[in-house]
Amino acid sequence: MNKYASNLDAIPVGKLAPDEAAAELARLAAAIAGADAAYYNDDAPNITDAQYDALRRRNLLIEKRFPKLKRADSPSDKVGASPSAGFEKAKHAVAMLSLDNAFDDEDVAEFDKRVRKFLGLADDSELAFTAEPKIDGLSLSLRYEKGVLVLAATRGDGETGENVTSNALTIADIPERLQAAPDILEVRGEVYMSHDDFEALNQRLTREAADKTPDLFANPRNAAAGSLRQLDAAITASRPLHFFAYAWGEVSEALAETQWEAMQRFKKLGFKINPLTKRCKDVAEMLAHYARIERQRAVLGYDIDGVVYKVDRLDYQARLGFVSRHPRWAIAHKFPAEKATTVLEDIEIQVGRTGKLTPVARLKPVTVGGVVVANATLHNADEIERKDIRKGDWVVIQRAGDVIPQVVEVIKSKRKKGARKFKFPDRCPVCGSHAVNEVNPLTGKTDVDRRCTGGLVCPAQAVERLKHFVSRRAFDIEGLGEKQITSFFEQEIIKEPADIFTLRQRQETGDINLYTYKNKSDGDIYLDKEGKPVATNKKSIENLFDGIDAKREISSARFINALGIRHVGETNARLFASHYGNVAAFYEAAVKARDTEIEAYQDMLSIDGIGALVAQGVIDFFAEAHNRDAVDRLLAEVTPLVAQAANTQSPVAGKTVVFTGALETMTRDEAKARAQSLGAKVSGSVSAKTDYLIAGSGAGSKLKKAEGLGVEVLTEEQWAILVG
Ligand code: IVH
């Protein structure tokens, strides 16, 4: 644990005496350097991103107040190390997705129902699932060509991972060659470390550190990840890692007819499959197996965090396909959260990208399920009020999987006398603007969240928006992560997204000088201990420019997601991109749609999955001149690509279709999913823009409207012929 991070803000900056300020700057420099090393070099962050940002912010505030006290090794001069350079990137032939979660028996029953509904199966028809432990490690994809391992890649962002082939080859459970395998076979599974090996590794690291403080792994999963992602394969070889196979990516021929048989095939090929894998004939058997696995959890010798159920028949899996990032045919049934009690030392308010004020509990660090927890989210003012959470209280906290820890309840009997109710601030702690609970324009309800009204003047919002802009699912710029963005923002080198794309030009014209990290606005040249300019690292700055240039062309969906419009995340951004085809058309529609009567508004609402609240978020965003200006400046630098329909070959790519009435050969959900996968837009209502109405039996008003508008009407059979 980084101790400094937890007792931050002891004295307000305004009240610091110079000697206190100097001492604190020294402590901050050490704490930030320590956090950098833990994050970049050891793969084991010792504080949260929010704590890290708070440290840097406080450092900067003190430096602003006492410019003369600024240290030669000031953290504000460093852009931060570049994230895990060294591994080659590896694009996955088939994306590596994650699983949807179920938290109780009911969720599992609903999953079974959803699958049946999608496939059009009766409640009492046969539908088998496999059930197996969910291993808490890191997933790895192993590509074999003609039976030889040619690539081992980590998951990364699901599309692109890191090439860790030489490291994977040191793992005994991973065969280098396969007999009688398909020509192309990607085996996927989990790399993990056993409890015993984890303990032994930490003991060894302690011995090796001799009298220095050892850098230990917090849990077996971090140990497995840190060991696999070693640049030196000899280090990986010295760490005992294991592998269970449970899924596959690209295959040149079908592996089997069922999930169960595919797993048996893996076993024959020489892979380990989890011995607790079972084929279950219905939900009751699945839940019974879940209970069995949960009972064995403590003695398994490795970490698991739930049970994964998968539809057994592979033809069903193929029909079910995927929805955004999850397969429809599988679900992870998580084990209940682990709990602990500790003291809540303070309540801090964080300001997010949309101005939302989130209260965060600073806790006396406590171990929950093998992980040290020092913070928990408190959600909003209502939550604090409802649970009556006060500073100094003893609280029960829980942690479920990778979810942020939460405060479950206060132990009132242990409350100290005189503990006062928490007063939620009505001003933004970062910029001082009023913070208000907005009234939803559509429902008239007051929002539970309090938001800073500072908008563009609030540095917390600006910097969070920029972080979102460069994040993985948005622009994903190599060499420009959260830490670099924060630093550039603090130096006023990047204030809005377009500034990222003018960096090279500003550098070339001498407007800024990144080599010395000289910033024109105050004319300072930051010097190191010897008095030489800092960061004269041409190579890393050239790499940064190249990373930026590589994103001058970007998918329209990523572009839209990057804007950080309220309610528009990855999924909705994709819906907009494929509906409008490009950013310009989306922009134009959003401006026109301000008048809710107008066709542009109706058209936006006709997008399947887009409701009034999302539309309002988009309209509000483009109603602001400063937002339009910022987007215009960005569009002058960046070219969003025309959204490719998922399948441009198909005769219905780009067409708008509406289904109505009862279909016979497939369910409505399946028909919709299939049309979308062929690049069609599926709308819920008929308008002049509809290309085809597919009318099943009993079609009524939509059919009439389509006929009235002269929209082409197809029977289910004609549709099936059209799409092949
Ligand atoms: S199946 C298409 N089976 O859980 C999805 N995943 O939350 C294929 N995991 O990224 C995944 N044990 O790293 C599957 N028995 C298991 C698993 C498992 C652990 C991990 C995997 C995945 C994550 C999803």
Image: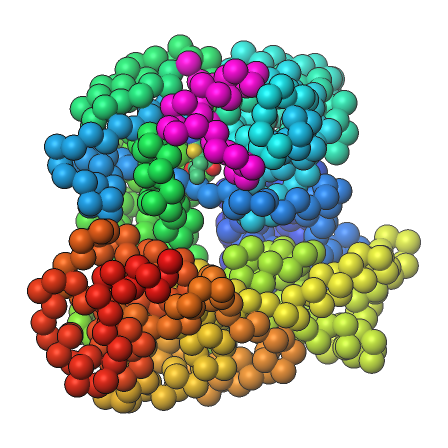
Q: Is residue 608 above or below residue 392?
A: below
Is residue 244 or residue 634 the one in the foreground? 244
306 to the left or right of 2: left
Q: Is residue 633 above or below residue 92?
A: below
Q: Position of residue 702 (x, y in %)?
A: 15, 74
- Residue at left 28%, top 73%? 692
Q: Position of residue 704 (x, y in %)?
A: 13, 79
Q: Quadrant of the N terminus?
A: top right
Task: Residue 142: name its quadrant.
Answer: top right
- Residue at left 65%, top 26%? 147
Q: Position of residue 625 (x, y in %)?
A: 46, 87
Is residue 691 or residue 424 the one in the foreground? 691
Q: Is residue 316 visible?
A: yes
User: Magenta part of the protein: which range?
Assistant: 246-275
- Residue at left 58%, top 45%? 93
Q: Quadrant of the C terminus?
A: bottom left
413 to the left or right of 143: left
Task: Residue 110: name its quadrant.
Answer: top left
Residue 251 magenta: yes
Q: Is residue 688 above or below residue 654?
A: below
Q: Is residue 44 visible?
A: no
488 to the left or right of 591: right
